[in-house]
Image: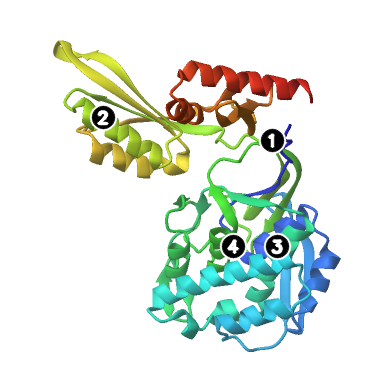
């Protein structure tokens, strides 16, 4: 029987934004070996002095990552930076991740400035400290054996920020472009809390944004930002652990609409579109509405980060003029897919961590039609095949 190995997960809680140095500090604080980090970054031959020092923000002990001195060259093209990464002593996966981060950053800068990516100068991002931030974060993830990265919604900050291009609104253009489609908000002091470097790390590496995925927490770390705010701890929290196999969100949003003037064909199509767009579940329930009119309750269960996309679909694909939304907690069991052979062909079987199982309906339906047999026979053969397999393990 197939055994699903646990993944090593890093979840970034960006309640005070995220920058490159905060990311490295948080990962070292969570257990990445500082000496190995310094050794790896020395292979970039920038001449910079790298250190990690303990500090505190609003009573929270945190680690601060420093890059001091080094060469003064501050303008590089993407190709130059990629060559530096390839020539370094970083492990292969860390090199790949660092290259992905700079590629995303280059694409964003190219869109913002309206130039080909080959002509993008990385300005502040091409400086020694930013190269060390990105390479250091990717090396720290490797030192911690992280397989997958996830993030909370991102606090971008507000107000304005001074850049090489003058005073710009927060989030800065590159940061806003990198976080397109991601859940963001602004809270706290009027200043930049999320930098382009921090946004690029999440845009390139994070597999999802929203609630913390199901995991067994093994270590936590806090990376300090430059300033110590009076209102909240200016830190990035990194939570490390192993996945439990349950991939669905532990917090979901439920969206509902009572509809009495859409045809069944329209509602059926809306249900298909919502599921295709990422809804976890969509149901249609008959109602008796005011004035004794028959109607339908359309209920959508979704991940919080999909709320706006799915709400827009509910408005565009149905006649409703209003939605109800509320959050709910959901508990799920870990599960995996096991394939079994039946007299009619191969069928996937969904197996929960408690041992319950169910043959995949679509597989059984396809085989029933191909062999012109009753669906219940294919379902029974699939269940029998899995029971026999499970009994031998």
- Asked if labels 1 and 3 touch by Cβ distance under 8 angstroms, the answer is no
Where is mark 2, residue-wise? 267
Q: Is residue 276 above or below residue 125?
A: above
The extreme right residue here reads 35
Residue 169 position within the rendered picture, expressed as x and y whole percent measured from the top left: 40, 67
Task: Nearest to the eye among marks 3 and 4: give it.
Answer: 4
Where is mark 4, residue-wise? 201
| Of pointers 3 and 1, the one earlier in the residue sequence | 3
Q: Is residue 6 left or right of residue 157?
A: right
- Asked if labels 2 and 3 touch by Cβ distance under 8 angstroms, the answer is no
Residue 296 position within the rendered picture, expressed as x and y whole percent measured from the top left: 26, 21
| Of pointers 1 and 2, the one earlier in the residue sequence | 1
| Of pointers 4 and 2, the one earlier in the residue sequence | 4
Q: Which mark is residue 244?
A: 1
Q: Is residue 28 above or below residue 66?
A: above
Whole-Å distance between the Cαs marked 3 and 2? Answer: 49 Å
The extreme left residue here reads 291
Observer-nearest residue: 14 or 272?
A: 272
Residue 8 position within the rendered picture, expressed as x and y whole percent measured from the top left: 72, 47
Where is mark 3, residue-wise? 24
Task: Nearest to the eye among marks 1 and 2: give it.
Answer: 2
At 55% from the left edge and 71% from the top edge, which residue is drawn?
103
């Amino acid at each position: 029987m197939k055994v699903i190995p646990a993944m090593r997960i890093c979840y970034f809680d960006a309640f005070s934004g995220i920058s490159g140095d905060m990311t490295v500090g948080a990962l070292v604080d969570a257990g990445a070996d500082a000496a190995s980090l310094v050794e790896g970054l020395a292979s970039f031959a920038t001449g910079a002095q790298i250190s990690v020092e303990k500090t505190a923000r609003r009573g929270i002990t945190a680690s601060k990552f420093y890059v001091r001195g080094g060469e003064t060259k501050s303008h590089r093209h993407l190709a130059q930076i990629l060559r530096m990464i390839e020539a370094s002593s970083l492990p292969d996966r860390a090199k790949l991740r660092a290259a992905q981060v700079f590629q995303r950053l280059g694409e964003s800068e190219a869109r913002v400035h309206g130039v080909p990516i080959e002509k993008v100068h990385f300005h502040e991002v091409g400086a020694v400290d930013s190269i060390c931030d990105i390479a250091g974060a990717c090396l720290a993830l490797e030192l911690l054996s992280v397989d997958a990265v996830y993030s909370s919604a991102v606090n971008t900050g507000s107000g304005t920020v001074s850049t090489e291009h003058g005073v710009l609104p927060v989030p800065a253009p590159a940061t806003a472009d990198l976080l397109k489609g991601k859940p963001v908000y602004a809270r706290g002091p009027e200043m930049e809390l999320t930098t382009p470097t921090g946004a690029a790390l999440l845009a390139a590496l994070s597999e999802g944004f929203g609630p913390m995925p199901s995991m067994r927490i093994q270590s936590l770390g806090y990376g300090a930002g430059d300033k110590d705010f009076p209102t909240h701890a200016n830190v990035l929290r990194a939570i490390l652990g192993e996945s439990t196999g349950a991939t669905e969100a532990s917090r979901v949003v439920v969206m509902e609409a009572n509809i009495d003037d859409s045809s069944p064909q329209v509602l059926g199509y809306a249900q298909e579109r919502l599921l295709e767009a990422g809804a976890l579940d969509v149901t249609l329930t008959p109602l008796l509405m005011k004035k004794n009119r028959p109607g339908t309750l359309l209920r959508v269960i979704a991940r919080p980060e999909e709320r706006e996309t799915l709400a827009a679909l509910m408005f565009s694909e149905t006649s409703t003029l209003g939605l109800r939304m509320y959050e709910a907690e959901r508990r799920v069991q870990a599960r995996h897919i096991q394939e079994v052979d039946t007299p009619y062909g191969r069928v996937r079987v969904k197996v929960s961590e408690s041992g319950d199982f169910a043959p995949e309906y679509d597989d059984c339906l396809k085989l029933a039609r191909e062999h012109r047999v009753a669906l219940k026979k294919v379902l029974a053969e699939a269940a029998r095949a899995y029971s026999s397999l499970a009994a031998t393990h």
